[in-house]
Amino acid sequence: MTASRILARLLVILASLALAALMVFHQQVPDVAGLGLVVDNLAPWLGLGIVALFLFALAAGGRGTFLMLLLPALAWSLSFGGQVLPTAQRVTVDGLSIATQNVHGRSDIDSALALADTGASVIALQEIEQGRDVEVTAALAQTHPYFYSVGTVGVWSSYPLANAESLDLGLDWSRALRLDVQTASGPVRFYTVHAASARPTGHADRDMMLSNLARYIARDPAERIIAAGDFNATATDRHFAPVARELEQMRYNGWGLALTWPRTPFAMLGIDHVMTRGVQHASLQRIDAGNSDHFALVAELELADDA
């Protein structure tokens, strides 16, 4: 065996170990120059590294080299595999349908009408341009006459709303709200949020908003809670963890992750979420709506078990 082939096999083995460790411990990567943010949010895509290592292993040869690839494959499966498997879609007996989308300040009315056509009882929009909530309210007046908006977020509902209030998540302007949806099965506490942007050059505002949102939810005595919106963080982001500890994230009922941004040329990150506490999941779908740069999410939730 040549020295170059021995070196190639050694490199594949070391790379396999490093890749597996990165998949499992990505949240411990120091966030220097935004590295932690990038690694956390792209963590599921680390699986592509297995394909690259397989190609190197073909060139290096050796049974042990290929066996080492099982280590990162197992690490990926345990860390992210459960997120890509489809969930069984349930038929709701007494349900609530929620639709959410970041309209990117240019697709508010088109998105609102498209989401209303899905039959969603509650529509949550984020990044609404100033004053456009009035036009959305007029467009949805027949199907969703109850509404509340503050700052860049708004909720329109076919059910009456109560106890509506803006949430101070630490910024100088409102990007989140909380209210009760008065369904036939009783009230459901609903949050919607448009977290601040997160970039490698800075994400402190987003981190603060997510931390404060988690504190609000932790102190909330409501038995049934739904939170939906643009969190500007994937499920693997270390700063999303405080919210994830308080609520259960709905999983996509199709194969793969519910990647919502960017819409073109193809979605890479699932930064929009529907999360719950005390509510049974039925289905979560990703759909096109309007001309935003985000896909929309439509969730069906079962309320009968908690009535």
Image (cartoon, rainbow, N blue to C red):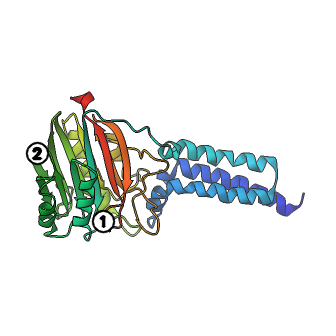
Disc number at residue 142? none
Q: Residue at 16% x, 70% y: name it.
A: 130
Q: Secondary structure at mark 2?
A: loop
Q: Position of residue 257 (x, y in %)?
A: 46, 51
Query: Could you classify mark 1 by the number of other residues whose Cα lies within 10 Å: few (under 14), some (14-19), or many (20 or more)?
Result: many
* Distance from Cα at disc 1 to Cα at disc 2: 26 Å
Disc number at residue 290? 1
Question: Between 49 and 200, which is closer to the camera in this rendering?
Answer: 49
Q: Residue at 40% x, 65% y: name it.
A: 263
Question: Between 180 and 299, which is closer to the camera in this rendering?
Answer: 299
Q: Residue 78 is drawn in which quadrant?
A: top right
Question: Looking at the picture, which amino acid does disc 2 mark?
Answer: Pro
Q: Position of residue 121 (x, y in %)?
A: 21, 47
Of the 4 image quadrants, the one containing the N terminus is bottom right
Q: Residue at 57% x, 47% y: name it.
A: 76
Q: Secondary structure at mark 1?
A: loop
Front disc: 1 or 2: 1
Quickly name the residue at label 2: 160
Question: Looking at the picture, which amino acid does disc 1 mark?
Answer: Gly
- Residue 305 in view in this figure: yes
Labels 1 and 2: the sequence-earlier one? 2
